[in-house]
Image (spheres, rainbow, N blue to C red):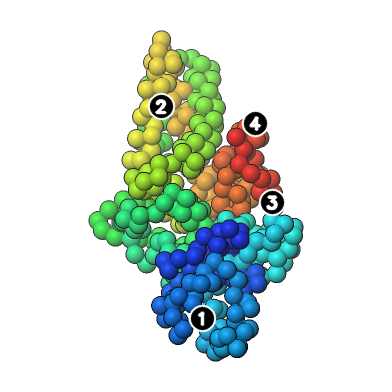
Amino acid sequence: MPGRTLPTFTLAEVESHNTKKSCYVTVGKNVYDVTDFVDAHPGGGDLVLDYAGKDITDILKDEASHAHSEAAYEVLDDSLVGFLEDASNGASANGKAKANGQANGTYVHPRTGMSCEEDLSKDTDITSDYKTHKFLDLSRPLFPQVWFGGFSKEFYLDQVHRPRHYKGGASAPLFGNFLEPLSKTPWWLIPVFWLPPVTYGLYLASSGLTAVGEVACFIGGLGFWSIAEYTLHRFLFHLDEWLPDNRVGITLHFTLHGIHHYLPMDKYRLVMPPALFAVLATPFWKLAHTIFYWDWNVATAVYCGGIFGYICYDLTHYFLHHQNLPLWYKQLKKLHLEHHFLDYENGFGVTSPFWDKVFGTELRGAKPGKKSN
């Protein structure tokens, strides 16, 4: 499973799994996926489907109607996929629902199925995960599975935001061919690749600016990046509501950012490959020189400040996931990892929570709030 905590389901969600292709049943608060058992049931598959999406506690106990062996209960134990939400909207992660949305005193997010940042680093049982969720098999290349999977947008978004962890933090196969190395980027490549052109750009701009003027433009570029970081993360990387419901849109989303939420502790798919960022950065070069059309040097200095802001962002992002940090960054780390395991619909600032506070998308702590408009 993605973490130590299984997800929760509403009664309506369980009732919707009532076909031969997807058959869920409940016993008390436990939810079981018995799809694979439909055809194997000794009494015939129709008997199982009669109770699809329903509670089977009574029929299991009714020996006069249908006696059940220990093997039947073992099948159920192997098929546990989650827990039923309490009617008062509490989420249960141990079969004992609590009205305050907690399990053993710890909040469990009903959509990520996780309760703490440590859950992000617990290895996923690959076979069990695929059998349970029918999404992606981590042992096979992911890109073709997303492209040919035929997933609906709703199902894809639900699954891609349930974090998995692959073999101690190694990179799961994405393409499975010669493109595989191009999909991995070590963190140190970002400053090595981008600092030289930033330095050269500032050198060129200095010929037409005073030192104070160039510093002012550079700081202005940093400020522009700050709002661009928030905007890109919220409205491009998390364009969930506006994502086209087709395989092109879903595959692009997965490649751009979905894979990071699916495997958030993959250290080689955390910072942005230089080629991809160059594509995203090109329009901003045009924008800077359109806004500051009267002075090439001003536009270039502002742009270089923005690119330096990006470098700081990508390095910060990496270290928030993989390093023990000083006090100030510990709070940033806490907020960002909560964005992954607790509330991916808020907390879009990575280098600073400032714009989240301005636009009302800051994380709310143990119990995440609804998405802000």
Which badge, 1 or 2, is on the more N-terminal residue? 1
Question: 10 Å neighbourhood of mark 2: few (<14), some, or many (≥20)?
Answer: some
Image point (27%, 53%), residue name: 179
Q: Which of 71 and 103 lies nearest the eye of the viewer?
A: 71
- Left or right: 1 with respect to 137? right
Q: Which residue is mark 3?
A: 367
Q: Nearer the viewer, mark 2 or mark 4?
A: 4
- Which quadrant of the rendered structure holds the C terminus? top right
Q: What is the three-letter code of the residue carrying label 1? A: Val
Determine the image quadrant of residue 370. top right
Q: Secondary structure at mark 2?
A: helix
Image point (67%, 64%), residue name: 92
Q: What is the three-letter code of the residue carrying label 3? A: Lys
In the rendered image, residue 160, in percent from the top left (x then y), is placed at: 47, 54
Q: What is the three-letter code of the residue carrying label 4? A: Val
- Alpha carbon of mark 2 to alpha carbon of mark 4: how far? 23 Å
In the rendered image, residue 253, in percent from the top left (x then y), is placed at: 41, 45
- Alpha carbon of mark 3 to alpha carbon of mark 2: how far? 37 Å
Q: Which residue is mark 2?
A: 284
| Residue at the limit of the structure toward the left, as seen here | 178
- The answer to whether one can see residue 141 in this image is yes
Image point (61%, 66%), residue name: 83
Q: Are marks 1 and 4 in contact (CB under 8 Å)?
A: no
In the rendered image, residue 36, in percent from the top left (x then y), is placed at: 43, 74
Q: Secondary structure at mark 4?
A: helix
- Alpha carbon of mark 1 to alpha carbon of mark 2: how far? 56 Å
